[in-house]
Amino acid sequence: MINPFSPSLTLRQRLAVVLAGWTGPVMMLLAIMLWVGYKNVESNTIEGVLDHELQFLVDAGVSPSQVSSDRTGLTYFRPALATGLLPPTELEKLTPGSYPNFNLHDMSVHLVVRDISQGDRAWLAYDVERYNRRTSNVRWALLLAVAASAFVAWSLAPLLANLVLAPLPS
């Protein structure tokens, strides 16, 4: 590690080291902030859409057999409307609410549970595999951006230091 306070370095070299050295941590901090924001927005969006979708299915009186899991990625259970389609026992134990990473039949799903009326409960699950793939792509893109910015900073820092200190005598 180069010490920017070393007396053996010129002012231009010290400035270049500081410029390049601060770029990496600042970019990493920005990437972390973007990542946290992305995860929050994405999770809140999925939860909001599932809440609205479940409300629509309930209000429209849609039977679970009418919801195509293959086409929509949604799995809908409402025993009051479809006695043949009972929810798995692990779902029956859940209280009303939202469950972001619930394991259902070896799938990671975002699950919303709602009591409609006495003895009438509905469950709506969304397979989050596509969401997980997209999240992985964003993570790699952020890491690549941080690495690229660090490389550019280290490459351009000496040039920038010379430009900033040009009015000063060498």
Image (tube, grey):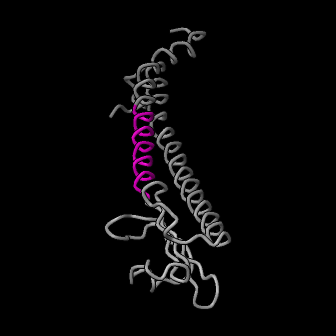
How many labels, in total? 0
Q: Main secondary structure of the magenta part?
A: helix
The front one of 125 and 44 is: 125
Q: Residue at x 50, y 9 (%)?
A: 170
Q: Residue at x 54, y 49 (%)?
A: 38
The front one of 67 and 22 is: 67
**Where 37 sits versus 144, above or below?**
below
- Give the side of residue 147 with respect to residue 113, left or right: left
Q: Residue furthest right?
A: 59
Magenta segment: does it hold 113?
Answer: no
On the question of residue 70 being in view, the answer is yes
**Where 74 sits versus 147, above or below?**
below
The front one of 130 and 120 is: 120
Q: Residue at x 45, y 52 (%)?
A: 131
Q: Residue furthest bottom?
A: 118
Image spot of residue 111 (x, y percent)? 49, 70
Q: Quadrant of the N terminus?
A: top left
Image spot of residue 4 (x, y percent)? 42, 30
Image spot of residue 106 (x, y percent)? 31, 67
On the question of residue 100 being in view, the answer is no
Magenta segment: does it hold 145?
Answer: yes
The front one of 63 and 167 is: 63
Provide the residue span drawn in magenta: 128-147
Q: Quadrant of residue 53?
A: bottom right
**Where 107 sits versus 118, above or below?**
above
Image spot of residue 14 (x, y percent)? 45, 25
